Image: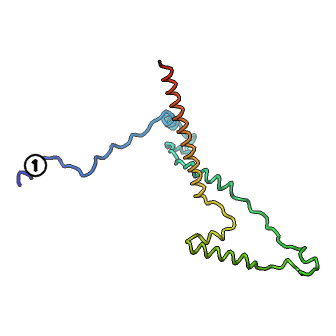
Amino acid sequence: MALLALIALAAPAATYGPVAPAPPKPKVTASSAAAQDACRNQRPKNDREIVVCAPRTEGYRINPDIMEAKREARAQSVRPRSPESYKDTTACQSVGPWGCTGTPSINLIAVGMVLATMARRAATGGNVGQMFVTDPQKTEYQLYLEAKARREAREKTEAAAALAKAARAKATESVAKP
């Protein structure tokens, strides 16, 4: 037991977990070095002026699919129109066996068909609320998914074209070397 205690004291203390990585070195490019030199050489013109020198930060990259979806959403939005007047002033001007035909009424056949469709959708677990959407427009998320799918398809075709070009180049090299 004493021997184990002496070995434990003689061994250096081990740390738990992986070794901590070295801190990252700041990137110094030609443009950032030139900006730092320009900032050092800049002096205030008078005592009331303050010169603040700070490195320009790299901004966040905005997903191009999101930007395309927003452009599509703006393009889809319809400007509000002036309110229309649905008054029919000509319906009651004629005299005949039907009387005034412009009075509001309920189409009972259409109501029955809507109720039957609602019951069928509810029984099969369908979306009944979707029936009441009179002006269906895609949400920004749906537009984003479509833009993403288009970009991925475009990248896929470009990659396939690059592979085909590389294969043709390799085939011409093998033919050229006898």
Residue wearing tag 1: 7
Viewed as shown, does residue 69 lie left or right of 40? right
- Residue 20 drawn at (x, y percent): 30, 47
Seen from the viewer's position, the closer of residues 165 and 14 is 165
Instruction: Quarter of the image for the N terminus: give it.
Output: bottom left
Viewed as shown, does residue 132 lie left or right of 81? left
Please name the amino acid that badge 1 sits on: Ile
- Residue 94 drawn at (x, y percent): 94, 77
Viewed as shown, does residue 88 lie left or right of 151? right
Question: In the displayed structure, would residue 68 be above or below residue 27?
Answer: below
Q: Secondary structure at mark 1?
A: helix
Give the residue displayed 57% in from the left and 46% down from the top.
151
Question: In the displayed structure, would residue 54 be above or below residue 69?
Answer: above
Label 1 CA crowd tier, 10 Å (few <14, some 14–19, many 20+): few
Question: In the displayed structure, would residue 112 be above or below residue 130?
Answer: below
Q: How many marks?
A: 1
- Residue 86 drawn at (x, y percent): 82, 71
- Residue 46 drawn at (x, y percent): 57, 42
Figure quadrant of residue 89: bottom right
Give the residue displayed 59% in from the left and 58% down from the top.
142
Residue farthest along the left direction in this orientation: 2
Seen from the viewer's position, the closer of residues 104 and 125 is 125
Seen from the viewer's position, the closer of residues 89 and 23 is 89
Viewed as shown, does residue 28 lie left or right of 109? left
Protein image colouring: rainbow
Give the residue displayed 74% in from the left and 62% down from the top.
80
